[in-house]
Image: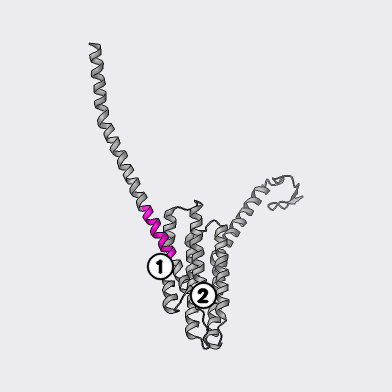
Amino acid sequence: MKLCPNCNEWFDDDKSVCPHCGYRYKEDDERVRAYVDNDLGKFVNENTKKHNPWIVSLAILLNLSIILSIIDLFVSDFCWSCFVVIIMAAVFLGARLIFLAREKRFSDKSVRLFLMIFSIIIIFYALVISKASKIGQDLSYMVHYIIPTLYIAYILAVMIRFFVKKITITKVVSSMLSIVGICLILALIGAITFKAQGFALAMCLIPFALSFLIALNMGIYLIIDFKKKMQSLDNEDYDKDNDEEINPDYEVLKEDDKKQEDK
């Protein structure tokens, strides 16, 4: 049994209309439920936009990083906060990339952006701590080895995707051109500011050299291929023009031969 909200009379559960007043119970109940669900969905969407968990997490990490860095740089002799901040940044950026991959919004552009952000964080700490440390703490190895390794890994990943035919040459060229400037800056910072030598200098130069050479060679290949396509199109147009000029005369000759045979 259920109670009619209109006349307050009881009726059977299997009936959708109240036998006393004609109140349609199920239809109105569905309307109310749909209205509530709609309002609840709007409320959740608005709150999700206002309180995006990624933005909240980023704000917390930024504030924590700033507080730790200020305390550490001005109070401690040995700066340990940089390792905590770098690990937090790596975890956050890695989690964000995984999320974008699951949402099918993953792109090379996002990887390059996160690499650049991570590189800036490492370079900042390496410069500040190496130059201002009271006990001669040196973080130049991060610029000599960690950042170049990340960019070399990215370049290899792009080339692997190209060889398995998941991206085009144009995509490879755009990806390499997007990082060649950053790799040049990293090489200059490592070579001039941190005075890299030997293997450290080679590691600083490899990402720039690889990205520049790949972009240059594939760019030349694209230009040559484009010229070949244009020449083939010109030849096809030339052949079509010749066919149009020859065909009418051929038809006229055919007609003359037929007239002579009739005579």
Within the magenta stretch, is there residue 216?
Answer: yes
Q: CA distance from mark 2 to mark 1?
A: 19 Å
Dot 1 crowding, Cα within 10 Å, few <14, some 14–19, many 20+: some
* Residue 179 locus on image (x, y percent): 43, 65
Residue at x-position 56% and y-position 69%: 92
Residue at x-position 42% and y-position 54%: 170
The tag earlier along the polypeptide, 2 or 1, is 2
Within the magenta stretch, is there residue 127?
Answer: no
Residue 136 vertical placement versus 231 (above, below): below
Magenta span main SS: helix
232 lies left or right of 71: left
Disc 2 residue type (three-letter):
Met
Task: Tell me the element at label 2.
Answer: helix
* Residue 249 locus on image (x, y percent): 24, 26
Q: Which mark is residue 213?
A: none
- Give the farthest residue toward the front: 198
- Give the farthest residue toward the top: 263
Q: Is residue 123 visible?
A: yes
Q: Which mark is residue 181?
A: 1
Near-viewer residue (37 or 156): 156
Near-viewer residue (257 or 73): 257
Residue at x-position 32% and y-position 39%: 236
Q: Which residue is mark 2?
A: 142
225 lies left or right of 37: left
Task: Tell me the element at label 1.
Answer: helix
* Residue 94 locus on image (x, y percent): 56, 66
Quadrant of the image containing the C terminus: top left
Disc 1 residue type (three-letter):
Gly
Please name the colour scheme applied to the rendered image. Answer: one colour
Q: Which residues are magenta?
A: 208-222
Near-viewer residue (192 or 114): 192
Q: Is residue 52 visible?
A: no
